[in-house]
Image (cartoon, rainbow, N blue to C red):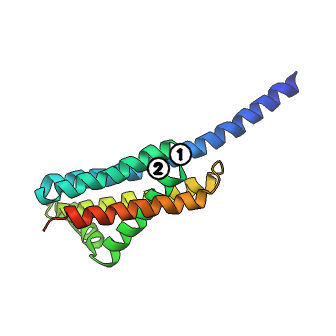
Amino acid sequence: MWNESANFTVQGCMNGSRLNGWFSMQVLIYTGAALFMVALLVSAVIVAELRLLHSLQALIYLAVIVLARRNSAWGFGAGFFIGVVWNSFSLFVTHLMQVGAVAFWSSLRTGDVKQIVPMMVALGGLGHFILIIASALALLRHDVEIKKWWKFAGGGAAAIAYFVLIIAFARPR
């Protein structure tokens, strides 16, 4: 009798740890997406010309959250690839992430907040780093779906295609 309850407890812990590991990946995906959506919202409130673009862009992150909740490789791919593309652009092309980090540290030193939009770019970049790591780890732990790598790539391609489309039509002129 004692042996059976010990086995039950060990199995319960093993199942619980697997669930907790998956739950933590979902929480990190939600956190990364939410941080980026906060950055979108604050930027859109401050710069009216960004409202349409940022509203449409937020749909990507809502889709990532919904698909991650459903344990879908499509959502993991969308979160991973949109984060990589956006952060690469912000770090290596516009350098706004670096400008935002400098502005953030400057505002901590002086107490004067001058460049809030670049600070939101840095916050969005942080959200993307979280989203990139969590999406990759969630996919690696994800062994339920057949052809998960194709779905991962497909989700990324769909997110990037949508992103390019909304930039082409909704960016401020």
Q: Residue at 54% across / 57% down in the picture?
A: 151
Real-space Cα distance between discs 1 and 2? 6 Å
Specify the farthest residue to the bottom.
93
Would you say 115 lies left or right of 155 here? Answer: left
Image check: 160 left or right of 98? right
**Where residue 70 appears, x then y in whole percent?**
51, 42
Name the amino acid, label 1.
Ser
Give the number of the disc on residue 28.
2
Q: Please report contact status of discs 1 and 2: CB closer than 8 Å, yes or no.
A: yes
Image position, residue 34 (x, y; %): 35, 48
Residue on which the image places disc 1: 24
**Position above or below: 28 against 4:** below
For the point 29% across and 72% down, the residue is 98
Q: In the displayed structure, would residue 95 be above or below residue 24? A: below
Quarter holding the N terminus is top right
Question: Which quadrant is home to the C terminus?
Answer: bottom left
